[in-house]
Each structure stands twice: as structure tokens, then as C-alpha cells.
């Protein structure tokens, strides 16, 4: 297990976050020349990759925590500061671009509903602010935040998962199989009745998270046999994803593909040496794109140049967020580890 911390998870998370951002840019900008490239940036697959990595790293974090309380505090410090800042900043500053007067904006029930829903990770309750982005493709201020509540649910489920294993004497593999089957059954049922928006929520997303936990718990085995396992996984993934479009073994095979990339290609090991900007890229890109769409900048100027400007701004925000908001709230050991990497 001594090699478990030498990996490419930082690289993968940046790839996944950028994929989601590009997918949203194509959809929100509605630039005709971009639409044919939408299939190249599969946001759902990128999010599934995030869930696999979360399962792996969160299980590791829980086992390395002295108490469940310490574990929960670490998770809160990692997620909440930048998230709360973003929600509050958008809620207050977007009065400047609202169709409503400033007074009506802040007195609107929609404003307070948005604030309450988003600060408690229930973004689906009210994704829009009064009079903001009404002429955009969608009015949502930040449509990427729905996954944060799923991540938070994962964090809370891990102690319960370990409690059942430890005190109820349940076999971890039996429990994981049960959770996996419930997850894929839930997902396939709601997809079959054309309710994908519900299917992708919990427990539909749990299969990828559980696969991440299994990869962590059996790290030595998968590390030893990874070169033999990867080819069947690639074949099965291609069959499910592109031929039959099914969702049965996909969390397993795609999860292992993520693991394989994470523990090969050593030249990517220090990708995050200057900081972990993934979270910032993920949570800031959507409102930045929405602002550019609101001002019709994709229509007025070269959309490629505008897209580059968007991503430059998002990267700057992610870097500032890491050093000003995120890093200072991490555990002392995590901050020390960042200094060593640099």
C-alpha cells in the first residue's frame, strides 16, 4: 500500500472537470460550429469518473481519520468554503444583471429560496435567481452544482458503510454487491421510463462510488494484475457504452479504466504540484459561461477566442480559489503534503 499515494488522480480530475466545462460551453453558448463536437465531451462519463475517484479517496480518507468526527470535518473544510463563497457571491452580485430592480431582486422570494436551497446543496429546488439569465438557453446560475449534493451524500454514507461491516459483521464484498445491484437496478428502471434526471441521482450513482471503494480495498491485487485486466475492461466498456448502450458492468469496467490510468504513466504523477485546481474549475465554469452568453459575446466576437477567454478566466478563478479559499482550510497534514510536492 506504500505506493498508493503516487498516482495521477490530479491529472484525471482536471481532465474530467475540463470535459464537463467544455460540454457545458457547447450547450450553453449554442454556437452552431461547436455543436458537432458535443459528442466528444461526455460530461456524464466525466462525472462518473469523479465518483470512482471519490470512492477510492474517501475510503482512504476515512480509514486514515482517527474518528468519524475528524473525517467529517475534513470533508466539510474541503467542500464548503469555496462552495459557500460562490453561492453567496453570485446571489449578491448578480443583482447587477437582473431585469428586476435591486430592491425587488433582494425582496423576491425566489432570491431567498435560491439562497437557502443552494447553501444547503439542494440546488434543484431553485437553480435560478430573479430576472437573471432569462434569455439564456437555461436560467440556472450554476447547473454543475447538482453533483455536490451527491458527493456530500457519499461522504455521509461511508461511515455507515464501515459501521455495517465492522459492527454487524457483514462481509464487505457482499454488502458492496448488494449496493451495486440496487444502484444499477434503480438507474436502469428510471432510464427505461424516460426519467434520466432522477436516474443519475442517488442511488443511481452509487455503483461508481462503490467500485472506487473496492479498488482501494483491493489495491495490491489490482495493481499486480492491472495489465491483464485492462484489455477485457476496454472491450466490455466499448460494448456497453457504444454498441448496446447498457448499464450493467459499466461502473466496474470504467472504474478500473480510471484506476489503470491513475497508476500508470508516471510522468503525470506530479501534475498537481502547484495546487489542486479541479474543484475551482468545476464550480466556477458554469456561471462564467452564463455571463458571457448573457452579454452575447459568443455572437459578437470569434467564438473560439471567447471560449479561450472563458477558460482563462475560469483557470484564474480556480487558482485564486485554491490559494485564498481552499488551501487554508485543509488539514495540516494536507497542507504540509502540498508544500512537499512543490
Image: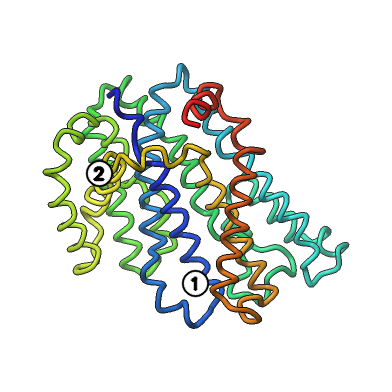
Disc 2 to disc 1, C-alpha distance: 29 Å
Which residue is at a point 36% across and 58% down the rendered structure image? 45
How many marks do you count on the picture?
2
Tell me the SS state at disc 1. Answer: helix
Height in image: 339 above or below 309? above
Is 33 positioned to the left or the right of 316 in the image? left
Res 193 → quadrant: bottom left
Seen as rendered, the residue at the extreme right is 103
Is 316 positioned to the left or the right of 265 in the image? right
* Residue 176, x across and y down, in percent: 26, 37
Q: Nearer the viewer, residue 154 or 289?
A: 289
* Residue 98, x across and y down, in percent: 77, 68
Res 225 → quadrant: top left
Circle 2 residue: 260
Which residue is at a point 28% across and 47% down the rendered structure image? 255
The disc placed on residue 26 is 1
Tell me the SS state at disc 2. Answer: helix
Which badge, 2 or 1, is on the more N-terminal residue? Answer: 1
Res 81 → quadrant: top right
Is 250 positioned to the left or the right of 227 in the image? right
* Residue 196, x across and y down, in percent: 39, 64
* Residue 332, x across and y down, in percent: 56, 22
Amino acid at each position: 500500500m506504500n505506493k498508493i499515494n503516487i498516482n495521477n488522480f490530479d491529472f484525471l480530475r482536471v481532465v474530467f472537470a475540463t470535459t464537463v466545462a467544455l460540454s457545458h460551453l457547447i450547450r450553453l453558448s449554442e454556437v452552431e460550429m461547436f455543436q458537432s463536437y458535443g459528442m466528444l465531451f461526455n460530461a456524464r462519463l466525466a462525472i462518473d469518473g469523479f465518483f470512482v475517484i471519490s470512492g477510492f479517496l474517501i475510503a482512504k480518507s476515512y480509514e486514515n481519520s482517527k474518528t468519524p468526527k475528524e473525517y467529517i470535518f475534513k470533508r466539510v473544510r474541503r467542500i464548503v468554503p469555496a462552495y459557500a463563497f460562490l453561492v453567496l457571491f453570485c446571489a449578491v452580485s448578480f443583482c447587477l444583471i437582473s431585469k428586476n430592480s435591486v430592491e425587488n431582486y433582494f425582496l423576491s422570494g425566489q432570491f431567498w429560496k435560491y439562497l437557502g436551497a443552494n447553501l444547503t446543496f439542494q440546488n434543484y429546488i431553485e437553480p435560478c435567481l430573479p430576472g437573471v439569465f432569462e434569455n439564456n438557453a437555461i436560467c440556472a446560475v450554476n447547473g454543475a452544482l447538482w453533483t455536490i449534493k451527491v458527493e456530500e451524500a457519499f461522504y455521509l454514507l461511508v461511515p455507515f458503510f464501515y459501521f455495517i461491516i465492522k459492527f454487524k459483521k457483514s462481509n464487505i464484498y457482499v454488502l458492496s454487491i448488494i449496493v451495486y445491484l440496487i444502484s444499477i437496478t434503480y438507474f436502469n428502471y428510471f432510464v427505461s421510463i424516460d426519467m434520466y434526471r432522477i436516474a443519475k441521482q442517488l442511488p443511481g450513482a452509487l455503483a461508481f462510488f462503490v467500485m472506487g471503494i473496492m479498488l482501494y480495498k483491493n489495491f495490491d491485487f489490482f495493481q499486480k494484475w492491472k495489465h491483464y485486466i485492462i484489455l477485457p475492461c476496454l472491450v466490455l466498456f466499448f460494448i456497453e457504452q457504444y454498441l448496446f448502450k447498457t448499464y450493467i458492468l459499466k461502473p466496474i469496467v470504467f472504474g478500473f479504466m480510471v484506476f489503470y490510468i491513475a497508476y500508470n504513466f508516471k510522468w503525470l504523477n506530479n501534475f498537481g504540484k502547484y495546487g489542486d485546481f479541479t474543484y475551482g474549475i468545476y464550480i466556477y465554469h458554469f456561471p462564467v459561461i452564463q455571463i458571457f452568453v448573457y452579454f452575447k459575446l459568443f455572437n459578437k466576437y470569434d467564438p473560439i477566442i471567447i471560449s479561450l477567454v472563458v477558460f482563462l478566466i475560469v483557470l484564474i478563478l480556480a487558482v485564486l480559489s485554491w490559494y485564498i479559499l481552499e488551501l487554508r482550510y485543509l488539514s495540516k497534514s494536507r497542507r504540509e503534503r502540498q508544500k512537499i510536492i512543490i
